[in-house]
Amino acid sequence: MAPVRIGSAIGSGYGRRPGRPGHTTAAVAKLLQTLIIGGTAGAFYSLIALGMVLVYRTTGVLNLAHGGIGVLCGFVAWDLITLRHWPYYLGVTAGIAFAVLLGLAFERLVIRRLAGRPDLQTVSTLALFIFAQGFVFIVPWWGNTWGQVFPSPLLGKKVTIPAAHYAVTYDQILLLVATAAVFYGLHHLLRRTRLGMGMRAVSDDGVAARLMGVQPKLVSPVVWALAFALSGLTTMLLAPILFLDNQSLTGLTLKAVAVSFIGGLVSLPLTVAGALLLGGLEAFTQVYQPTAKGLSDAWPFILLMVVMIVRYARQRSAFEDKAVVRA
Amino acid sequence: MSVTELRPVEVTDVPVVEQRSTATLPLPGRLGFRVAAVRAVGGLAFVALFLTLPRSLDRFGPAYAIDFGLIVALAVLSASVVGWIGEISLATLAQMGTGVVLLNSLQNHHVPLALVLVIAAVASIPVSLLIGFFALRLRGVNFAIATLAFAYLAQKTFFQSYLGVQGGFEKPIARPSFVASDTRLYYLIAGFTLLVAAACFVVRRSWIGTRIDALRDSEMAFAVLGHSPGRYKLFTISLAGMIATVAGVFYGILQQVVPANYFNPILAIAYFAYAVVGGLGSIGGAIAAGLVFGAVPKYLDAASQGRFVGYDQFFAGLIALCAVRIIPGGLAEIGHRLRRRAEGR
């Protein structure tokens, strides 16, 4: 029996209701479009949230500067590529290298000085966020920071998905692939490498980790450099799709913060699942309930509430189980 | 010498007078002359500054700048008050926005300003309780994220539809005649700020403040002692909410047209950073930081004829970064050090 391709099956009218020609096809196409939009949005949130989870899991600090640093590095790369006519890949590499240097400097000058004070370290990332945002605003030749077109060699190239009647840009595909790669890379780093296990060990118990030969002074710069590089990379992947924009990219970061909460700020798979769920819910609301304008923006808050209630119920149930065992 | 040879020291042998004369610290409850003098001079200087501030800064810019600074000071104080329970709230601006919306709708019903302030303070409680609900279950970073999500929800769903991007009220906010000028408005807002600061000071010094401190230090121990952590958390968050909401009312009166973008959660993050620079939990530090970050950029804008527009965020971030690194106690710590030095302690 010849294999049946889903796209061709839908296109040939497979599954249509009698008397309503084309209705099912249109509905399936709409559904697929929604899933693609939701998946892309989920990839945005995943990529940002993964960077935040990396820092929190390995240092116990919520890196609120993630979005701000990303935008700053994005503008550095944009400056080099667009205004100084550097080759694209060189400009992007320079932008990421700038992020790495910034991460190392921040760790050396601020984070290390505030060792053992995760609350102040979190506040310092917040101050860095404001500083980075302000810096982008004051460079005179960066001009309009509300929406610059970020160059990409893939710009304008797209592929149409026949069943969905929807064109997906190569940049979107690259984003999805990059999200999967970052997820796998971080998972592998934290679970399978000595460096990753050292990072987790320092986070869990710094003294014990030191006794086991892990050097926090070497681990911490790596974490911050990696996190800042990831933040720069994220912006450079998102900007060709959305524009290089101070406000909207930071807005995405706010949603990504909510997503990282779904994963308890530590679980990479749950974070990605939460991001895809949020992206999907937003897309479904926008496509199927376009009149409910506020609902799409309310989803991060609603998800947060649900997660909180579920966690509370689980904690309570665990507590009651323990009480029964003791009795 | 055996034990039996020891004789008890008679009271008359103790050189009581000499011992007293070597004491250098003042007795508890009594201020030394220098301390009293420093405090009196400081108090008088403060009163003089309070009364003449808009006029003395007249040459640098309009009184609008100092009005705005005071409103930012109230918002920062609100963020700082939540710091009493060791938590971070990023919903301050959302609560300010509630104040603006309340002002607009109550003005449409011809409610006088004094009553608007009271209603706004009372109406802020349900919103604060909603935020407080998170505080009962979440702590630290998780609570901060929850408040951030709340602020995002409020801005996107409520303020953008009610205020619009351009601040489009159906009927714009009218400024009452007795605060027609910015200078007059200064005295109203400054008076209220002093009142709020005094109230916060009283709370901090009362048994409630002591219990809140105990709660922040150890919630478990606090609960074991028979107190309700939830009750004190909700009280603190409600107090902060009242301050922020009334600040929103003043902001509405000052601006009259308020776009929804002002209540962007990102700005709430900045306000929290200001609170940290002021010294999280400190009343005076929060007000000082609010004035520094709210009024100074406006005066600079006016003095430089707009050439410094946009630099405020950059400098705020830089100052916050330096403050966290060098003086974690913020402006409050500097103030304490200066006062102690002046008082010779």
Image (tube, rainbow, N blue to C red):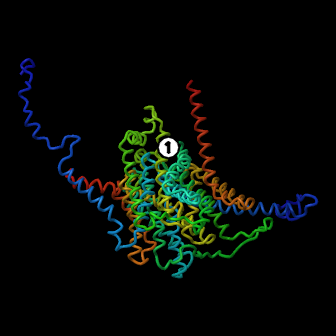
Badge 1, how many Cα within 10 Å: few under 14, some, many 20+? many
Chain on which label 1 sits: B
Which one is nearer the viewer's eye here, B220 or A157? B220
For label 1, the residue is B234
**Vertical side of B172 occupied by A320: above or below:** above
Q: Position of residue B48 (x, y in %)?
A: 29, 61
Which one is nearer the viewer's eye here, B109 or B250? B109
Secondary structure at badge 1 equals helix
**Vertical side of B110 occupied by B203: above or below:** above
Position of residue A22 in the picture relative to residue A317 (left or right): right
Position of residue A234 in the picture relative to residue B186 (left or right): right
Task: Check the image and name the residue furthest to the top.
Answer: B4
Q: Quadrant of residue A153?
A: bottom right
Position of residue A289 in the picture relative to residue B186 (left or right): right
Which one is nearer the viewer's eye here, A325 or B109? B109
| Placement of the N terminus of chain B among the 4 image quadrants | top left
The amino acid pointed to by label 1 is Leu
Q: Position of residue B37 (x, y in %)?
A: 20, 53
Q: Quadrant of residue B335?
A: bottom left
Question: In percent of the image, x 8 and y 30: which residue is there?
Answer: B14
**Vertical side of B66 occupied by B336: above or below:** above
Q: Position of residue B277 (x, y in %)?
A: 38, 58
